Structures are given as structure tokens and as C-alpha cells.
Image (cartoon, rainbow, N blue to C red):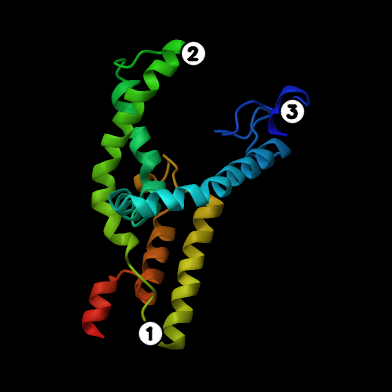
Amino acid sequence: AAVVLVAVAGYPLSMVGLQADADSNATPPTLALLALTVAQAGVVLALRASAARLLERRPVLWAGVASLGTVIITVFLWHMTALVIVASLTHLTGWWPQTTAIDGQWWALRPPWLLLCTLALVPLVLLFRRLEGAGEPGPGGPWRTGLGVLATSGGLGIMLVQGTYDPDRWLGVPVPAVLLLAAGMLLLGIHRSQRSRETTG
């Protein structure tokens, strides 16, 4: 269905849009993007049984998958930062070959590009992975919990409306929203690690 929508119905080819324009399938989501999403989910579900049998026979492989699962949100949150770092060190310096078309050269550059992005991502994951294991919010009573939820929701809401970066702001970020979010997380006890809760509990 996705192929037909792109080839016949004139939907954009790219499924990842970087800006809200007519050539984006992402803003707003189109039928072509929905079809691709269903197709990807279907492929994963179709391979699930085979993958489960493979992991049961290969404990080492399963250990690697399980280890990756403990930092998957950290990877998701920081992979674009790694990409920006690599792009700044390669494209802006003129070190990386400039390609405007998706041709043989573009595909040949994908493996080293992914390798560079992975090398930039590894230290970010090592630095921030402990935050992913923060565990459940700690008990703090109804008033503290309520204030924590309000502060956290308020900080996220401000970021949603104002954005997370603006070069005209001090430090480029919405400082009041960041402080409000941090205060809410402190009130909820999210900053405490699961291990420290088990020790104090």
C-alpha cells in the first residue's frame, strides 16, 4: 500500500520529514506513513517467533539484546545529538564528501557514516545510561506528588509550546521550563536511583 501511494497517488517518497512542507509525510502523518508503519510492525511480528527461537539457542546473543534493551531509551534520546556532532565535525569542516543525489557514492558513504555516529553515541550512552535506570518515583505523600506532577507537566508543556532551543534565549534553552521540570523530578524522587531506594528502604 505504501508503494502504491507513493508511486501512483503522488505521496512524497521520504518518510522522514525535517520540516513542515508539502514534501513531508510526517507533518501531518499521511496514509503512506501509516502504511509503512503497519508494514514494519507486521514484519517484526512475523519474525518474532523465529527470533525468539534463535535467542533461546544463543545465550550470548540474547545477553547482547538484553543489554541493549537497558539503554534503548538513552540511545533514542541521544542519537540525534551524536549525529549533529558528527555532522559538525565533517560537513561543516569540509572533510566529508558532499553528495546531493542518492547514488552509488551516497550508499558507499553510509557504513563509515553510521560508524562515526556510533562512535559519537557510545560516550553519550555511557554518560547518561544511569538516568534510564532511575526506577519508579519514590513515595512522597499526596501534596509532594501532586506538586511534582504539576511542575513536571508544566515544564514539559512550556517546552512543547516554546520549543527546546532558541538561539535568542539565554543558553539557547527555555531555562524556566528546565528548572520547573527539574524541580518536579526532584519532588517525585525520579532523580534517585533504584539501588539507592533499595538501600534506604
Instruction: Give the residue at mark 3.
Output: 4
Quadrant assignment, res 23: top right
Single out the mark in the foreground, 3 or 1.
3
Residue 83 is left or right of residue 120, and the answer is right
Q: Is residue 28 visible?
A: no
Q: Amino acid at mark 3?
A: Val
Single out the mark in the foreground, 2 or 3.
3
Quadrant containing the C terminus in the rendered view: bottom left
What is the distance, in whole Å, between disc 2 and disc 3 at their CAs? Answer: 26 Å
Single out the mark in the foreground, 2 or 1.
2
Q: Counting other residues with Cα less than 10 Å from the Cα at mark 1, is it few (<14), some (14-19), or many (20 or more)?
A: few
- Name the residue located 39 percent from the left edge and 23 percent from the top edge: 110
Q: Amino acid at mark 1?
A: Gly
Instruction: Give the residue at mark 2.
Output: 100
- Name the residue located 77 percent from the left edge and 23 percent from the top edge: 8
Residue situated in front as seen by the camera: 125 or 108: 108
Say which mark, if any, is on residue 122: none
Task: Compare marks 2 and 3 and give the one earlier in the sequence.
Answer: 3
Q: Secondary structure under badge 1?
A: loop
Q: Amino acid at mark 2?
A: Thr
The image shows residue 168 at horizontal and vertical percentages of 43, 41
Task: Compare marks 3 and 1 and give the one earlier in the sequence.
Answer: 3
Point out the residue furthest to the right here: 9
Point out the residue furthest to the bottom here: 141
Instruction: Give the residue at mark 1.
Output: 140
Quadrant containing the N terminus in the rendered view: top right
